[in-house]
């Protein structure tokens, strides 16, 4: 088949409280297509949530552009919007090829392919697989010979031979196609870090993969850390800072601090080359690997916040979930971070299988007795093809995903896993944790003193307050209506 036009869609719904991040996966794929094929393909790139687009809006763009192939990059939580769009696209043009990539496809390819509107799933890293798929389609070669795919053959889901290995030379991958991004528009959204120091901001990946064995982890990029060279990372930061005027870099690696020497070298280069940026780590770093020198160098390079993925302070659960974090070292790293004047934040997961309320309390006490200034309490979400899924099945043999909706795969889900398997109300436990952590005069004063003072933090505090008391979906609809009304009134005002 002839392929001329490719439409790449980041599906998702706009929610008042959501954090945003540029869809790096699609940006890397656009960059690789340009590197390999120059201007051969016309590419249309759509960010549904960022522009608050409905399925009808997407269909209109589909009709206008009339692509030969559509690629979706979806998280599981976004799969509902992805499926809606795939349905209307296929209704409009049954010949269009629909390819799914991103974490949802990698974890749920079998369920995703039950949907006949999806033709192929690209598993894990796709800088090699996606071009190989396009070439096979164009040459009418058998698709089941392309490595790294899942597809349907006669109603059966089939995996093609796996990719030999993950991409070793990350420096060989071009920088994400940053020219497709409207940084100003992202600046108006809450950044992945929950707030930001400077705007515009961008998320970057300096390495891929992680050797640790957390049971809940997807391991999308494999268990070996592959690193971009320091020069390559610095070049991208310079491009973002110089050409796109990006003032804050949010580093989202699976484990940025795995190689301390490399991390320190990147900091030194930022200082030596006098690159003025703010830096944050919204995806979490491993606390027990941190040393004081790296924290000092990060501070010198412009870092203002570090998130530590603590998850639980119960030694039993640390073992059960394979995280095995050294809690003493973690507390020390948090202390150093605070002493160096960087905001220490934490991620906590509540509702692990077999977790009891005393362990939840233990975690809360640990966090409250540390120097953590901001804590996010996630619900545990179980994904297939993870060790956590196996642990869950050992304890609850009947557990499967049949009564789950895609929107349940959300860390603030109102029907968390915990509530499904215990007599406790998981949502109330999380709200209680938020109230206990944030409703302390000392923490309120510290937040006011330490956190960057801009509108994003006000929105964030408002979000936190709502999270402490109310249910999300109800207030979401209210906020959406208020926002629409405000935009309409403003437009009317401008007209007159
Ligand atoms: C940055 C990030 C975010 C950002 C931006 C996400 C985005 N725009 O993609 C924000 C802050 C918005 C975010 C939000 C959430 N996130 Co998030 N996030 C990440 C993080 C840390 C990095 C993603 C990234 O940029 N990776 C780098 C790029 C290069 O990789 P990639 O996107 O996977 O793309 C590669 C392949 O997947 C593939 N590919 C991707 N897209 C496509 C498309 C096509 C057509 C093809 C062929 C291939 C392909 O090729 C790419 C290049 O190799 C990941 C962790 C991780 N390591 O992936 C979690 C992760 C993706 N997030 C996750 C989750 C659960 C969430 C939330 C649901 C959490 C919550 N609050 O409940 C929310 C979603 C809320 C919402 N819908 O807005 C999970 C997803 C699990 C799943 N099965 O869906 C992950 C894996 C973390 C985890 N361990 O749980 N997240
Ligand atoms: S430290 Fe992070 S990336 Fe590494 S295994 Fe654990 S969850 Fe996965």
Image: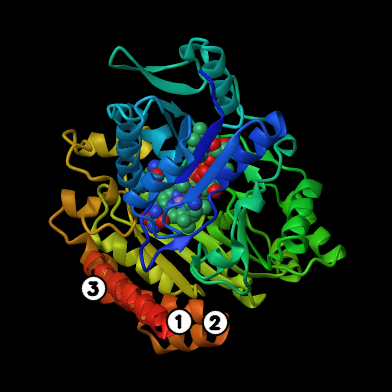
Q: Secondary structure at mark 3?
A: loop
Is 295 placed left or right of 55 in the picture? right
Nearest to N terminus: mark 3 or mark 2: 2
Q: Could you tell me how far apart the alpha carbons at marks 3 and 1 are, in whole angstroms?
A: 18 Å
- Residue 470 got which mark? 3
Residue appearing at x 70%, y 37% in the figure: 173
157 vs 328, nearest the viewer: 157
Q: Is residue 322 visible?
A: no
Cβ–Cβ under 8 Å for marks 1 and 2: yes
The residue under label 1 is 458
Task: Residue at the far front: name it.
Answer: 496
Cα distance in 3D space between marks 3 and 2: 25 Å
- Other residues around mark 1 within 10 Å, as few (<14) / some (14–19) / many (≥20): few
User: Can you identify the residue that label 2 sits on?
Assistant: 454
Determine which quarter of the picture holds residue 461.
Answer: bottom left
Label 2: how many Cα within 10 Å (few below 14, some 14–19, many 20+): few
């Amino acid at each position: 088949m002839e392929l001329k036009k490719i439409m790449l869609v980041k599906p998702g719904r706009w929610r008042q409280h959501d954090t945003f991040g540029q869809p790096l996966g699609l940006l890397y794929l656009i960059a690789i297509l340009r590197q390999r094929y120059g201007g051969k393909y016309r590419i249309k790139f759509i960010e549904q949530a960022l522009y608050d687009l409905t399925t009808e809006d997407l269909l209109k763009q589909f009709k206008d552009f009339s692509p030969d192939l559509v690629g979706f990059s979806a998280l599981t939580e976004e799969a509902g919007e992805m499926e809606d769009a795939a349905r209307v696209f296929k209704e409009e043009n049954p010949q269009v090829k629909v390819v799914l990539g991103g974490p949802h496809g990698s974890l749920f390819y079998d369920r995703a392919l039950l949907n006949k509107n999806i033709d192929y799933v690209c598993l894990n890293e796709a800088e090699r697989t996606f071009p190989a798929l396009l070439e096979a389609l164009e040459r009418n070669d058998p698709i089941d010979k392309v490595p790294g795919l899942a597809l349907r053959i006669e109603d059966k889901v089939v995996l093609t031979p796996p990719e030999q290995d993950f991409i070793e030379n990350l420096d060989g991958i071009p920088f994400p196609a940053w020219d497709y991004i409207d940084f100003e528009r992202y600046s108006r959204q809450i950044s992945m870090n929950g707030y930001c120091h400077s705007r515009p901001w961008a998320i970057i990946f300096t390495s891929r993969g992680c050797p640790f064995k957390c049971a809940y982890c997807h391991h999308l990029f494999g268990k070996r850390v592959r690193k971009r060279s320091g020069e390559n990372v610095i070049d991208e930061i310079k491009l973002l800072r110089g050409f796109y005027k990006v003032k804050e870099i949010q580093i989202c690696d699976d484990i940025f601090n795995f190689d301390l020497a490399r991390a320190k070298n990147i900091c030194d280069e930022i200082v030596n080359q006098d690159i003025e940026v703010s830096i944050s780590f919204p995806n979490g770093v491993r606390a027990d690997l941190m040393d004081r020198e790296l924290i000092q160098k990060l501070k010198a390079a412009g870092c203002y916040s570090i998130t530590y993925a603590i998850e639980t302070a119960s030694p039993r659960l640390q073992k059960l979930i394979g995280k095995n974090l050294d809690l003493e070292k973690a507390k020390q790293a948090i202390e150093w971070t605070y002493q160096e004047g960087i905001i220490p934040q934490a991620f906590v997961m509540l509702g692990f299988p077999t977790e009891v309320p005393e362990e939840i309390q233990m975690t809360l006490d640990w966090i409250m007795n540390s120097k953590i200034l901001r804590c996010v309490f996630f619900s545990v979400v179980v994904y297939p093809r993870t060790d956590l899924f196996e642990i869950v099945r050992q304890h609850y043999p009947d557990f499967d995903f049949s009564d789950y909706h895609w929107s349940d795969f959300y860390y603030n889900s109102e029907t968390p896993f915990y509530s499904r398997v215990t007599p406790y109300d998981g949502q109330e436990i999380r709200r209680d944790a938020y109230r206990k952590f944030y409703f302390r005069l000392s923490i309120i004063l510290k937040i006011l003193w330490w956190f960057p003072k801009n509108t994003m933090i006000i929105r964030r505090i408002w979000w936190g307050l709502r999270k402490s008391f109310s249910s999300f979906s109800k207030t979401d609809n209210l906020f959406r209506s208020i926002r629409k009304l405000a935009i309409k009134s403003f437009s009317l005002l401008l007209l007159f």
